[in-house]
Image (cartoon, rainbow, N blue to C red):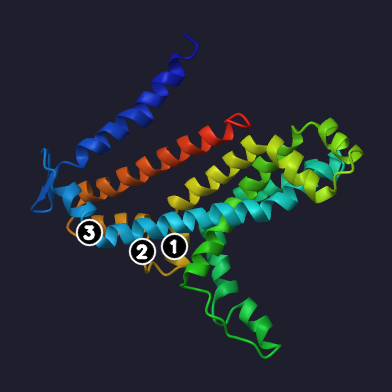
Amino acid sequence: MLSLPLLIWQLAFFLFPLLFLVALSFWTVRNFQMQPDLDFGNWERILTRRAFWDAYLLTALLATASAVLTSLIAFPAAYAISFKVSDRVKQWLIFVLIIPFFTSYLVRVYSLQVFLSDAGIINAFLGFFGLGPILMLNTLFGTLVGLVTLCLPLVVLLQTFSLNFVDRDLVEAAHNLRCGRLRTVLMVIVPSARVGLVIAALFAFILSFGDFVSPLYLGGGNPPTLSIMITDITKSGQQWPRAAVVALMMITTLLTVAFLAIQFAYKERGK
């Protein structure tokens, strides 16, 4: 009985919309109006287009690169917060990491344009040394910068919470056995915090895979990602059923990646 409200919530706001999205993918559009149908033409048209698979591959590569880079950049910060500072400083640092969530992600992306543009802050700084301008805006690099900016505070928080639960006795035992700092991190701390580290990377992948703002405003929207493709499809003749096909492919990919990541995270060592 206590879990019934949660079940109703999941059915109302996840399962039923998902089933409607599946049904919508088989509808047809005639005279710019959707009509219920059982037409597999939407799936055939989307899945046989090379443009879709190019966008799919690009989106997957950007999300993977964002998850890897964000995890690597976040780990030293999370390690320092968890192991190197006092509890009072740790509280303030965690508060600072929460502050970015108080501002709109779109505002942060617009501010990044000031840094990455040809006449922006970074190129102006490089100009003092006779370098540049370097093309960063409207490139894949700009998109990746935006994705890392989106995910970094959350990943640092998740990694910090995971490292806080690492048994300090194991770290001391490694030091007593003359294990160096780097080896202790790689052989003791990372395996002990594997679940949290994998879940943090998974969150980064999920956020990056579905992001629309960075690919459009920092990457220029060309080549398009799947999120941009959805908007382009809906603008061309109100083809919501075809956009539903793209969305379902994205959901299927995210569920598959999430399942594999969780399975790896909780896999027993040596099995």
As helix, strand or loop, the secondary structure at mark 1 comes to helix
Q: Which residue is mark 3?
A: 49
Q: Of tags 3 and 1, which is closer to the observer?
A: 3
Relative side of 227 to 32, left or right: right
Label 2, on which residue?
Answer: 224
Task: Report which quarter residue 188 is drawn in.
Answer: top right
Closer-to-camera residue (103/149): 149
Instruction: Give percent across and percent down for residue 265.
Output: 58, 35
Q: Amino acid at mark 1?
A: Pro
Residue found at x 21% / y 40%: 24
Give the vertical position of 208 relative to 2 (above or below). below
Q: What quarter of the picture does the C terminus occupy?
A: top right
| Residue type for callout 2 | Pro
Residue 186 in view? yes
Q: Marks 3 and 2, Cα distance to the nearest angstrom?
A: 14 Å
Query: How many residues crowd around disc 3 within 10 Å: few (fewer than 14), some, or many (20 or more)?
Result: few
Please tell me whether mark 2 sits on a helix, a strand or a loop. Answer: loop
- Residue 124: x percent and y percent? 64, 83
